[in-house]
Image (spheres, rainbow, N blue to C red):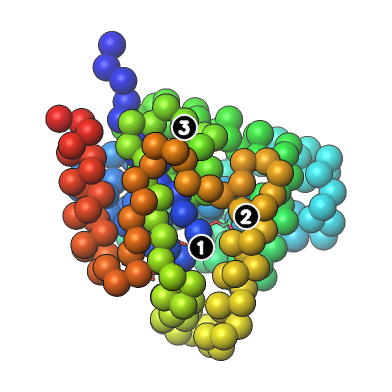
């Protein structure tokens, strides 16, 4: 029986994971799954319901009753929580700066990892996040660890924000990225770390196209 191809892409905030993962998926005609959007979605719902973001029991119970779904879209997939579209709402700075707290809850991770594995079992997939190569799909034949200097990543986020009409100072964005990376890398359950068998790609001075080409090469070497 033919195994699905799984491409796992991990790395710190704003390294370009979702941008290149989506383009790679398009090139190979694989499904793309943005796992960060799932953590953002439950964070949004908890905040809307004024739940204390460290109240694990309440958030896990809420998550189990919450449907998180994606539909294709350009330039970004549409994200739904139950029947409400949250594509833009989950990218707001309040969510970005709170999501790591919710993502550190073991019960939340357990539930979302199960859902992510179910998605990955259905078709060839490119999945991006923090723990895909280490915890969600440890058997993935292709694992990429994307990095870039923190200044470059802050700069990228800054430009992205300007396009959305958000004007957070560059220095503050840099600080926020450092705090989130620190939280994601030091949490107890499946922290952000490079899988032993992942290929590290430093994108600091690479264009999006160059990164996509590099990953394409790695996939082609693996699946030939
Ligand atoms: O796109 P960006 O780097 O800003 O973040 P994201 O991929 O949307 O992920 C948002 C947050 O969700 C991360 O900072 C992590 O706290 C959490 N996350 C996680 O813990 N595990 C994943 N597989 C994906 C995201
Ligand atoms: O998903 P993650 O947080 O890792 O990053 P992203 O949201 O895909 O990318 C952050 C920003 O960096 C986007 O605006 C991209 O256009 C830009 N960028 C990139 O992704 N890769 C490069 N090599 C250069 C810029």
Foreground pick, 68 / 84: 68
Q: Can you give x and y, in whole percent of width and height, for residue 38 in the image?
A: 57, 48
Quadrant position of ligand 2: bottom left
| Disc 2: which residue | 184
Q: Earlier in the sequence, mark 1 or mark 2?
A: 1
- Callouts 2 and 3 close, C-beta under 8 Å: no
Residue 26 seen in the current view? no
| Disc 3: which residue | 137
Foreground pick, 205 / 53: 205
Foreground pick, 65 / 117: 117
Q: Can you give x and y, in whole percent of width and height, for residue 118 in the image?
A: 49, 28
| Disc 1: which residue | 13
Would the CB of label 3 be found within 8 Å of ligand 1? no
- Callouts 1 and 3 close, C-beta under 8 Å: no
Query: Callout 3: 10 Å neighbours few (<14), some, many (20+)?
Result: some
Question: Residue at left 53%, top 53%?
Answer: 37
């Amino acid at each position: 029986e033919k195994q699905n191809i799984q491409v796992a892409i991990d790395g710190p905030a704003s390294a370009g994971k979702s941008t290149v993962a989506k383009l790679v998926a398009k090139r190979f005609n694989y499904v793309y799954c943005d796992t960060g959007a799932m953590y953002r979605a439950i964070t949004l719902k908890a905040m809307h319901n004024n739940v204390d973001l460290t109240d694990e029991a309440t958030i896990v119970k809420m998550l189990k009753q919450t449907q998180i779904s994606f539909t294709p879209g350009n330039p970004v997939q549409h994200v739904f929580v139950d029947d409400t579209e949250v594509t833009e709402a989950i990218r707001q700075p309040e969510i970005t700066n709170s999501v790591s707290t919710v993502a550190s809850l073991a019960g939340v991770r357990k539930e979302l990892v199960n859902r992510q594995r179910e998605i990955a079992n259905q078709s060839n997939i490119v999945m991006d996040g923090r723990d895909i190569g280490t915890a969600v799909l440890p058997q993935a034949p292709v694992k990429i660890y994307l990095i870039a200097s923190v200044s470059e990543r802050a700069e990228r986020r800054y430009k992205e924000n300007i396009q959305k009409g958000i004007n957070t100072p560059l220095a503050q964005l840099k600080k926020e990225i450092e705090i989130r990376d620190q939280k994601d890398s030091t949490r107890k359950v499946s922290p952000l770390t490079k899988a032993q068998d992942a290929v590290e790609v430093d994108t600091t001075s690479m264009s999006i196209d160059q990164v996509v080409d590099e990953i394409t090469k790695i996939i082609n070497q693996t699946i030939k």
